[in-house]
Amino acid sequence: MLGFFAQLASALYLSVLIFTGTRLAAAFARRRRLRATVTSAAGALFLGFAVKLSLSGV
């Protein structure tokens, strides 16, 4: 019985992720500036992480 509820929760969670992702993809397709801003912010975040990692000596 517990496995059934776990499967149900997983299916609901994945459905919400799929529908939310579809709506976000449509929003990014309509708005070029938003897409460019988010892409630039993600790139800056990765560069910042790379700098932090290189300075930490790991």
Image (spheres, rainbow, N blue to C red):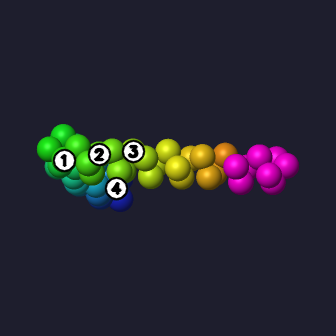
* Mark found first going from the N terminus, 4 or 1: 4
Q: Amino acid at mark 2?
A: Arg
Q: Amino acid at mark 4?
A: Ala
Q: Kindly state the secondary structure of the residue where label 4 is placed.
A: helix
According to the picture, the residue beneath numbered tag 3 turns out to be 39
Q: Which of the numbered marks, if any, corresponds to residue 6?
A: 4
**In whole angstroms, how far apart are the C-alphas of marks 2 and 4?**
35 Å
In the rendered structure, the answer to whether residue 51 lies left or right of residue 19 reads: right
Q: Which of the numbered marks, if any, corresponds to residue 31?
A: 1
* Vertical placement of residue 5 versus 25, above or below: below
Q: Which is more toward the observer, 10 or 36?
A: 36
In the rendered structure, the answer to whether residue 44 lies left or right of residue 19 reads: right
Label 2: few (<14), some or many (≥20) within 10 Å?
Answer: some
- Residue in the image at 70% along x and 49% along y: 51
**In whole angstroms, how far apart are the C-alphas of marks 2 and 3?**
6 Å
* Mark found first going from the N terminus, 1 or 3: 1
Q: Amino acid at mark 3?
A: Thr
According to the picture, the residue beneath numbered tag 2 turns out to be 35
In the rendered structure, the answer to whether residue 58 lies left or right of residue 20 reads: right
- Residue in the image at 62% along x and 52% along y: 48
Q: Which residues are magenta?
A: 51-58
